[in-house]
Image: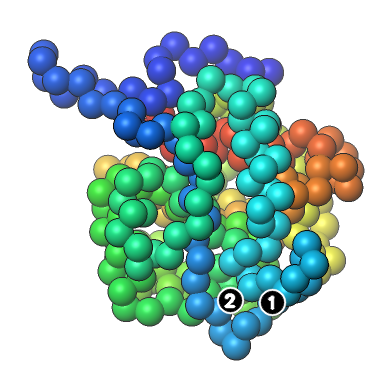
Amino acid sequence: MKKILILSLLVITIISADDLLYAQNDHGFRFIRIQYDSYGGGGSIYGRGRRQAPWAHDYPTAEDNLYEAISKTTKIDLAGQYMVLSLRDERIFEYPFLYMCEPGFWYANEEEIKNLREYLNRGGFIMFDDFRTRTGEWNNLKFIMKMVFPDKEPVQLPPDHEIWSIYYDIDPIEAPSWVSGGYGKYDDEYWAYFDDKGRMMALACVNQDIGDGWEWPQRRLDRADTLPFQMGINIIIYVLTH
């Protein structure tokens, strides 16, 4: 069930008696997909009549459907079309939420690693989606994140973490695994990176493909027609309020 949010989703905090800081009050929330170079073009598939690189899987239908779900079920201000940016683009610092698809094929250079570290240290968040453990894709992401934060390790989120109940009540254990490759219902895992103050900076949806549920809601089974959108909205609201 939806929960009433007492505070505005976009208000960060009162920092003094005279000053208020508002997140994104200049242009509202935008969904930012990250474009990147991949190992030998690995993971490319045909989609929407053209061959897609790993970072572009489900694009742009997933964004179109997610925006519709957000506008119909929340008060989040979608004041701007979704965008595709590189981690080398300074515009990423204007947005609190980034999304990366298929990070198992991500070939990160030094500039991307430096910018992502700065972005996350400033208060940003990135969601990693659509990758697997058996193929070494999770190991690739952990290797890159170790270069971003050498002193940090991912922490597996428990099923009762606030992110699963902040707006919709979700049981992540019972959520289907929408990733390709023969993964079953209970193979999905959710691992987070936290800063020194306990703020979640990154969420890795392992053996899961929530974006695929956004692109093909009519093909999903076991409540998947609504559950991927509920999971995405919960993550976004958690980010905007933390």
Is 51 placed above or below 61 here? below
Secondary structure category for the residue under label 2: helix
Residue at x 27% of width, y 53% of height: 121
Distance between the alpha carbons at the discs numbered 2 and 1: 7 Å
Q: Residue furthest bottom?
A: 40
User: Residue 199 appears at what percent x and percent y?
Assistant: 35, 42
Residue lying at 81% horizontally and 43% vertically, measured from the top left: 217
Mark 1 element type: loop
Q: Quadrant of the C terminus?
A: top left
Label 1 Cα crowd, 10 Å radius (few <14 / some 14-19 / many 20+):
some
Q: Earlier in the sequence, mark 2 or mark 1?
A: 1
Give the image location of residue 151, x and y in percent.
30, 66
In-front residue for pair 186/84: 84
- Few, some or many residues within 10 Å of mark 2 (<14, 14–19, 20+): many
Q: Position of residue 25 (x, y in %)?
A: 33, 28
Tell whether 210 sits left or right of 162.
right
Q: Which residue is mark 1?
A: 43
- Marks 1 and 2: in contact by CB < 8 Å? yes
Q: Which mark is residue 105?
A: 2
Q: State left or right for residue 17 relative to residue 140.
A: left
Q: Residue at x 51, y 26 (%)?
A: 76
Towards the viewer: 113 or 22: 22
Amino acid carrying label 1: it is Gly
Residue 12 visible here: no
Task: Answer above or below: position of 182 versus 175.
Answer: below
Q: Amino acid at mark 2?
A: Phe
